Amino acid sequence: GQNIDQPTEMTATEGAIVQINCTYQTSGFNGLFWYQQHAGEAPTFLSYNVLDGLEEKGRFSSFLSRSKGYSYLLLKELQMKDSASYLCAVVDSNYQLIWGAGTKLIIKP
Amino acid sequence: GAVVSQHPSWVICKSGTSVKIECRSLDFQATTMFWYRQFPKQSLMLMATSNEGSKATYEQGVEKDKFLINHASLTLSTLTVTSAHPEDSSFYICSVGISDNEQFFGPGTRLTVL
């Protein structure tokens, strides 16, 4: 079957760095998305990785290793507004989205 | 959690035809379902919130007469794109609302209008 695993919840301190991991087992791979979702709002696109390596975009970076079926989202200089759910989604060989259940990130002062 | 399916996965149609997309909650009775559309590498855009047994609530700018939503049961919501045109080509994704803070997403339906 197809499976995406990410931690259910993480807690971090304002100003710190946090890494949210995502491991996947899917039938084929055509890219991986990271989304941020605040409660009651639509998911916001953060990143799309299709090749191995690290992509940096401001305070957020995303890493992919296709051979390991692994990705992480790295958030630096955490701010209170970063408290949200972070969703990992993989595009499979049929170009369908396989969603992780999301990681709820709690930022403490 | 909730397992969400969508049918069809892919649909290609001629301009002017109508297309129905089904969203099913397989293991959860969903009073609320959401319909999104996504363009490549962009955020999901919420189109409407579907409530079982009542009319859907559409987001500003979404034509309710063009995107018909029916949520007739706790496990099924349908989105019908009426008189589809090439600009309606997109990835349509539904989700099931578990709580105020939690949604489970379907695999999406890729619509291509020729």
Image (tube, helix red, strand yellow):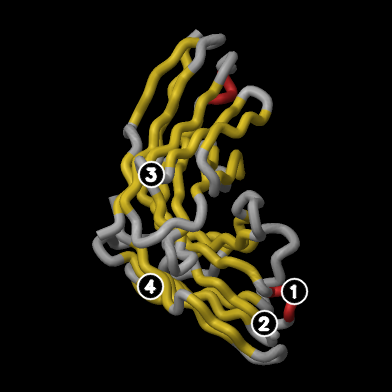
The residue wearing badge 3 is A67
Residue B41 percent location from the top left of the image: 64, 52
Q: Earlier in the sequence, mark 4 or mark 1?
A: 4
Task: Tell me the crowding category of disc 2: few under 14, some 14 to 19, or many 20 or more residues within 10 angstroms, Cα based.
Answer: some
Looking at the rendered image, the disc whose residue lies closer to the viewer, 3 or 1, is 3
**Label 3 to label 1, Cα distance in Å?**
37 Å
Q: Nearer the viewer, residue A7 or B65?
A: A7
Q: Earlier in the sequence, mark 2 or mark 4?
A: 4
Mark number, residue B76 = 4
Mark 3 — on which chain does it sit?
A
Q: Is residue A47 visible?
A: yes
**Alpha carbon distance from label 3 to label 2:** 36 Å
Dot 3: element: loop
Instruction: Say which residue appears at 59% left-offset and 76% top-offset.
Output: B111
Q: Amino acid at mark 2?
A: Val
Chain of the residue displaying label 2: B
Q: Is residue B54 above or below residue B11?
A: above
